[in-house]
């Protein structure tokens, strides 16, 4: 199964992930980042090698795994950890979902943008494998060396939540 998820942060900024799920895990196979920097639009496509695990099946609280990947073409390396935290109910635009909570921490180093750390928490519907809620916190540096910090939350408004 392949799931493509797009989060539109605002009129200019969006992320799109492609995740391939086959037993015993789900792996990130493609990441697209679109936005504006200094009023100039950009589109950045990342193909992680090897595709990192973003979830293990069956979901089990306490599961942990290491993350190591690179994209030589984009000049990116990443290391981190993933873990299945717990199961909890979350409200979405499609109703209440009893979702698994998964946390991914990554330190990403790029030639173009330096080093960033990102913690993504995803609430995943175990029946559809769709992320019904996601929060992301990113810290790093701008190309000029100034510190950056961003936080975002997205909640499923329409789609196969149950």
Image (cartoon, rainbow, N blue to C red):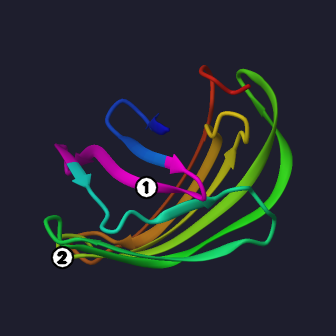
Per the image, the residue denoted by label 2 is 111
Q: Nearer the viewer, mark 1 or mark 2?
A: 1
Point 20% across, 45% down: residue: 43
Q: Of the numbered discs in the image, which one, if any, rests on residue 28?
A: 1
Q: Residue at x 59, y 53 (%)?
A: 23
State the extent of the magenta-drawn residues as a range.
21-43
Looking at the rendering, in which quadrant would you find the C terminus? top right
Q: Quadrant of residue 102?
A: bottom right
Name the main secondary structure of what is drawn in magenta: strand
Which of 66/149 is in front?
Answer: 66
Identify the mark at residue 91; answer none if there is no mark. none
User: Which residue: 17% across, 71% down?
Assistant: 72
Q: Residues within 10 Å of mark 1 (few under 14, many from 20)?
A: many
- Which numbered disc, 1 or 2, marks the residue that appears first in the sequence? 1
Say what secondary structure mark 2 lies in: loop
Left or right: where does residue 144 sit relative to residue 97? left
At a point 79% along the width and 72% down the height, the residue shown is 62
Inspect the magenta stretch and tell me whether residue 88 lies in it.
no
Quarter where residue 115 is shown: bottom left
Q: Is residue 88 above or below residue 5?
A: below
Instruction: Estimate the x, y position of residue 48 in percent, counting from the top left.
Output: 31, 63
């Amino acid at each position: 199964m392949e799931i493509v998820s797009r989060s539109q942060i605002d009129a200019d900024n969006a992320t799109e992930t492609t995740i391939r799920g086959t037993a015993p895990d789900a792996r990130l196979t493609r990441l697209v980042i679109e936005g504006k920097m200094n009023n100039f639009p950009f589109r950045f496509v990342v193909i992680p090698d090897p595709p990192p695990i973003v979830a293990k099946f069956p979901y089990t609280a306490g599961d942990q795994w290491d993350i190591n990947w690179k994209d030589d073409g984009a000049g990116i390396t990443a290391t981190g950890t993933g873990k299945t935290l717990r199961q909890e109910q979350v409200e979405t635009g499609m109703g209440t979902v009893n979702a698994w909570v998964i946390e991914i921490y990554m330190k990403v180093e790029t030639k173009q943008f330096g080093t960033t750390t990102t913690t993504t928490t995803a609430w995943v519907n175990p029946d559809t494998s769709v992320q019904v809620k996601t929060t992301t916190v990113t810290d790093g540096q701008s190309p000029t060396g100034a510190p950056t910090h961003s936080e975002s939350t997205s909640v499923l408004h329409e789609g196969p939540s149950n």
